Amino acid sequence: MIISMYKLMCVTNRKLCKGDFIKKIEEIAKTQPAGIILREKDLPEAEYKVLAKEVMRICKEQGTLCILHNFEMTAKDLGCDALHLPLPKLRSLTKEERVSFRILGTSCHSVEEAKEAQELNCTYIIAGHIFATDCKKDMPPRGLEFLKEVCESVELPVWGIGGISMENIEKVCKAGAEGGCIMSGYMI
């Protein structure tokens, strides 16, 4: 299990999980990462809501932040005040809808998007992808200089994503990031 002196956030992908996904979430939550983003993009909202309810319960028991992904109505229905939205979806919300979440994040792939996310009331952003990753085999990584530029362009905590590991998390934080988001390293 991943334990680090640097801040790490888990981004889920149950399709990468070789064992029982709920048991994996329990294991991860026990390590007290900075948060678990329940990012199960292939699920219809009704199925996501059932899963989210269980993951929220586990996170609450372990004192771990649970951030729901993509479905703002599900987050509201379940009383979750932490949400991560794709930038196009974030743009479609009213200011009142955005500020109703205590924690609101989005993923950014440019300095301009990071500045826009800040204007749209985000409380954090995820910038990537930083290093080569199997998730984006056909796209070159943006690198640490990109991450540094994003961190310097906004007053929000920035989390790096993409190929983040225990071997490079120190470089990510030295570039100015709050921490790193890990998917494969947690799920496998």
Image (spheres, rainbow, N blue to C red):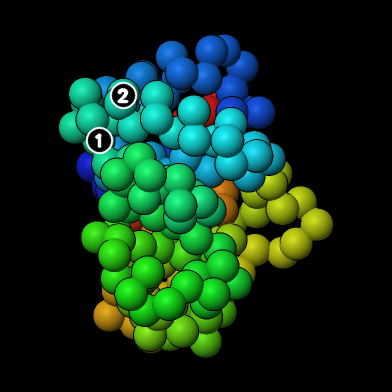
Task: Name the spot of residue 104 as percent of width and height, x first.
Answer: 35, 62
Question: Quick check: 157 left or right of 11?
Answer: left
Residue reaching furthest front? 77
Mark 2: amino acid: Ile
Q: At numbered mark 2, what does the secondary structure look like: helix, strand or loop? A: helix
Residue position for label 1 = 64
> In the image, is residue 30 above or below residue 83?
above
- Quadrant of the drawing holding the C terminus: top right
Q: Are marks 1 and 2 in contact (CB under 8 Å)?
A: yes
The answer to which quarter of the image holds residue 148 is bottom left
Near mark 1 (Cα within 10 A), the count class, few <14, some 14-19 or many ≥20, is: many
Number of marks:
2
Question: Quick check: 92 left or right of 181?
Answer: right
> In the image, is residue 51 above or below residue 18?
below
> In the image, is residue 84 above or below residue 35?
below
The residue drawn where x is 36% and y is 70% is 98
- Which is closer to the viewer, label 1 or label 2? 2
Task: Name the spot of residue 90 as percent of width and height, x first.
Answer: 50, 70
- Quadrant of the drawing holding the N terminus: top left
Residue position for label 2 = 58
Task: Name the spot of residue 59 as percent of width and height, x first.
Answer: 29, 30
Task: Name the spot of residue 158 as percent of width and height, x first.
Answer: 36, 67
The residue drawn where x is 40% and y is 24% is 54
